[in-house]
């Protein structure tokens, strides 16, 4: 599950990145299989249903064999990449703690506060709802911009992210406009 759904609360509550014991994954595993199997589309376009099913089955089995044969390499590469990333993230966290003069207890309190905020399901008025929407959209845009070049090596992937950022910016502009209308109506 990507857990980048409709609100920042969902990311806090359900993202593997924020759940203890969960590992970080690309989140594109299903898309990789679909991309591999999409090659079959052109060759099976005019086949009978039975022949098409057989061809897709052969390709799916091929995918499984390919994954099984390369699993040990993939897992070891992923393990070392994760260790390297962990060292970088720990160094970054220590740098931030030193810069902001924080302790581990302060961070634990912050994490608890964010979890409590995410779990709160109180009824809200339009202005509060719009404010939360604006905050979550701004956060999503900021994170997407930061990760745009960090996690994507291909230009096509970056173009897709840029399009998503532009869409979110449009939603953000609409939410800000709606919030100003609501604020004028409350005066």
Image (tube, rainbow, N blue to C red):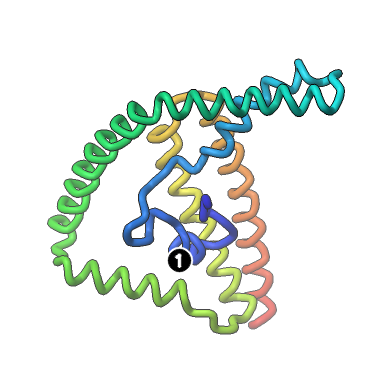
Q: Nearer the viewer, residue 2 or 133?
A: 2
The quadrant of the picture occupied by the C terminus is bottom right
Residue 129 locus on image (x, y percent): 59, 73
- Dot 1 falls on a residue whose secondary structure is helix
Which residue is found at the position 46% from the left and 72% from the top?
Answer: 118
Q: Residue at point 22% right, 37% down? A: 84
Indicate the position of residue 158 as horizontal and vertical percent values.
51, 31
* Vertical side of 9 occupied by 99: above or below: above
- Residue 30: x %, y % from top left: 57, 39
How far across and down, in percent of the image, does residue 126 sit? 64, 76
Considering every residue shown, the one lying at the far top of the view is 43
Residue in view at x 49 percent, y 23 percent: 66
**Horizontally, is 43 left or right of 116 in the view?**
right
Observer-nearest residue: 108 or 100? 108
Task: Please say if 3 is above or below 149.
Answer: below
User: With respect to residue 107, does 170 lie above or below?
Assistant: above
Q: How many numbered marks does the figure carry?
A: 1
**In the rendered image, the vertical position of residue 5 relative to residue 160, given as above or below:** below
Q: Is residue 40 left or right of residue 110?
A: right
- Residue in the picture at 45% in, 49% down: 142
Circle 1 residue: 13
- Name the image quarter holding residue 172: bottom right
Image-quadrant location for residue 185: bottom right
Q: Relative to the observer, which residue lies in front, 12 or 83? A: 83
Judge the density around disc 1: few (<14), some (14-19), many (≥20) Cα neighbours within 10 Å: some
Residue 84 lies left or right of residue 4; in this view the side is: left
């Amino acid at each position: 599950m990507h857990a980048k759904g409709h609100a920042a609360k969902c990311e806090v509550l359900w993202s593997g990145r924020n759940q203890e014991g969960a590992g970080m994954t690309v989140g594109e595993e299903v898309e990789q299989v679909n991309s591999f199997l999409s090659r079959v589309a052109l060759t099976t376009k005019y086949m009978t249903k039975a022949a098409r099913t057989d061809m897709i089955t052969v390709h799916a089995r091929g995918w499984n064999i390919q994954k099984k044969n390369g699993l040990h390499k993939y897992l070891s590469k992923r393990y070392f990449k994760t260790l390297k990333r962990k060292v970088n993230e720990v160094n970054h966290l220590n740098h931030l703690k030193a810069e902001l003069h924080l302790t581990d207890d302060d961070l634990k309190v912050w994490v608890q506060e964010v979890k409590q905020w995410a779990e709160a399901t109180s009824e809200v008025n339009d202005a509060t709802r719009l404010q939360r929407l604006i905050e979550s959209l701004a956060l999503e845009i900021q994170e997407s911009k930061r990760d745009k070049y960090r996690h994507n090596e291909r230009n096509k992937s970056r173009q897709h992210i840029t399009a998503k950022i532009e869409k979110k910016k449009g939603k953000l502009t609409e939410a800000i406009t709606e919030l100003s209308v609501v604020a004028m109506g409350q005066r």
